Amino acid sequence: MQRIPEVPPGASVRCSRCNKELWRHKPDSLNRSFALTLAALVLYLIANCVPMLGLHAVGREAFTTVLGGAQQLWHDGQELVSVLVLFAAVISPALQISFLLAILIGCRRERPPFWVGLLLRHLEFTRTWSMIEVMLLGVLVALTKIADYAHVILGTAFFALFGLVFLLAAIQSTFDPREVWARVEWAESEALPAANSKPVAEVTS
Amino acid sequence: MSALNPIALEQGLQSCHGCGLLSRPAAGAEEGRCPRCDEDLHFRKPKSLERTLAYLMAAAACYIPANLLPVMVTNTAGGSESDTIMQGVVLLWSPTGWPLSLIVLFASIMIPSAKILALLYLVITVKRGSIKNNSQRVRMYRMVEIIGRWSMVDVFVDTFTVALIQLQPLMSVEPGPGLLFFAAVVVLTMLAVESFDPRLIWDSANANEIQNEVTNA
């Protein structure tokens, strides 16, 4: 058990036992994250509407989007893998960006409502399963493989996603969940649904 | 170490997995819910070792068909040809393509097996109450946590190859049966990592230190 001291902006606090960073004081965290998240939303929308990559071969042209890839797998009888690809490349990033937006908008209020905490609690899950950077590497490998047979073209979506990877990393380094937790309205003060009847734990000072 | 920093568990305190709030269970009650974020509270992740081990065994079982069955089937006018993951790596190997070939070899073959072995080692050492190399073991856990997701790269390679090469009747590519098993290995090992509680690595060390303090006093 350790008490986290106040440190100047930019400085970080590490665990005395395992040396992991416990907290970094990120200046102007919520405003900067909000700006970056809005930019991420724009890139995400572009990336899912335009082609990812295409090819020219024997007088024919073919283009595919991220969704098209998942769709083709489904047609070929790999439904489970198709759902996984859709989840990791489309659904999780969408959840990640929309959760962040909702949290940051909620935090503009004097007292952020309870659902801000609920979304923040699940943000980590969407971050684990959104794999845009892995997908981009996969696209590069696929292109190299196909380049033997045909002339390949990188689509706009590839560059949009490339930018999105950097934006998500930037959000990661500016967003401070501790600041949100310090302001959010506590669950205990709300009337909790009867189905959730486990006793609430006591708080220590 | 424990003389300087009290351990929350020994003080009857629990930290929330959702928001990090430190709290004490209500008197006479079970672990309860977090008063701030409403998450179910636990002193340690429940049944952590058992769940990690179960996911690992499932992943190891899928690892074999994932590597033996073809992940991609190429149909041309001359007939069809199927490739396993390893054959895909060999095919990519060329004077210009070898860096990508190495990446796929690393991400698809070495990372999944290293991940299974590393987590197995962590589960066994925690189960035996080992107190050695704690910092290295925690670092190993974090490495596995960070690198693990890159195994998915082969699934995406196949997705886009299949989606793009549909030039019937000249040439078309279909996913093979190995792809499902390979995807299962990646997902199962990620779940195994998530169910392991790294604090367990330190728990046995603390238990031993307290033992020593008691016998010395």
Image (cartoon, rainbow, N blue to C red):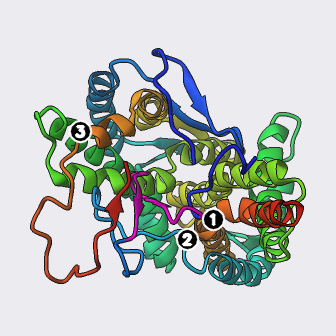
Residue at numbered disc 1: B197
- Work out how far the residue at label 1 is from the one at label 3, CA to CA, in angstroms: 28 Å
Amino acid bearing label 1: Asp
The quadrant holding residue B208 is: bottom right
Number of the front mark, 1 or 3: 3
Which residues are drawn in magenta?
B10-25
Q: Which residue is mark 2?
A: B45
User: Dot 3 falls on which chain?
Assistant: A
* Residue in front for this viewpoint, A5 or A28: A5
Q: Residue shown at 90%/58% (left/top)?
A: B132
Using residue B41 as the reference point, say whether residue A30 is left or right of it.
Answer: left
Which residue is found at the position 45% from the left and 66% from the top?
A72
Task: Determine which residue is flagged by label 3.
Answer: A183
Say which of A23 and A16 sits in front.
Answer: A16
Q: Residues within 10 Å of mark 3 (few under 14, many from 20)?
A: some
| A142 shown above or below A193 | above
What predominant SS class does the magenta segment belong to?
Answer: loop
Residue A61 is inside the magenta segment: no
Camera-nearest residue between B48 and A169: B48
Identify residue type, mark 3: Arg
Q: Secondary structure at mark 2?
A: loop
Seen from the viewer's position, the closer of residues A52 and B66 is B66
Mark 2: which amino acid? Answer: Lys
Q: Residue furthest front?
A: B217
Q: Secondary structure at mark 3?
A: helix
Is B81 left, or right, of B152 in this rendering?
A: right
Q: Residues at marks 2 and 1, common chain?
A: yes
| Same chain shared by disc 1 and disc 3 | no
Counting from the top left corner in percent of width and height, residue B90 is at 87, 55
Contact check, label 2 and label 1, Cβ < 8 Å? yes
Q: CA distance from mark 2 to mark 1?
A: 6 Å
